[in-house]
Image (spheres, grey):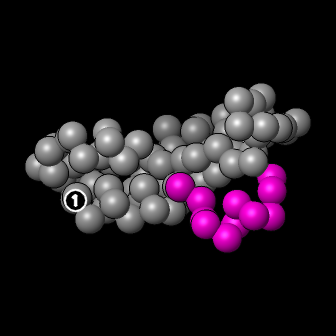
Amino acid sequence: MQDFLARVPGSAWRGKRVAVFDTRVPAKWVRIFGFAAPRMARRVQKLGATLAAPPEGFFVNATEGPLLAGEEERAAAWARGIAG
């Protein structure tokens, strides 16, 4: 994601509404380093985008997935809320 954000010109973000999410492994050590969504949200806001919703995280079973039980429904509800 950092590479993508670095390649898109800053002017491309100005005035855009964006939604930011990450996938998370439910492990305590991950919390030490923080989650990606809040950092991505701060970055796109600095580039001029507006958040369509607060950054969100969805839990996966392992680094390759799948989503934990109930997370797919939660993600769908989050997306519907953004789409309005």
Number of numbered discs present?
1
The part of the chain drawn in magenta is 26-36
Point 38% across, 65% down: residue: 42
Kind of residue at disc 1 = Gly
Point 61% across, 66% down: residue: 33
Point 29% across, 46% down: residue: 5
Residue 28 occupies quadrant: bottom right
Residue 7 occupies quadrant: top left
**Residue 9 included in the magenta stretch of the image:** no
User: Is residue 35 visible in the rendered structure shown here?
Assistant: yes
- Which residue occupies the foreground of this view, 4 or 80? 4
User: Which residue is identified by label 1?
Assistant: 48
User: Is residue 50 visible in the rendered structure shown here?
Assistant: no
Residue 67 occupies quadrant: top right
* Magenta-drawn stretch, dominant element (helix, strand or loop): helix
Q: Is residue 22 above or below residue 32?
A: above
Residue 37 point in image, percent of width and height: 52, 55
Residue 74 point in image, percent of width and height: 74, 42
Q: Which element is circle 1 on?
A: loop
**Residue 27 included in the magenta stretch of the image:** yes
Q: Is residue 72 above or below residue 45?
A: above
Residue 45 point in image, percent of width and height: 31, 62
Point 60% across, 53% down: residue: 56
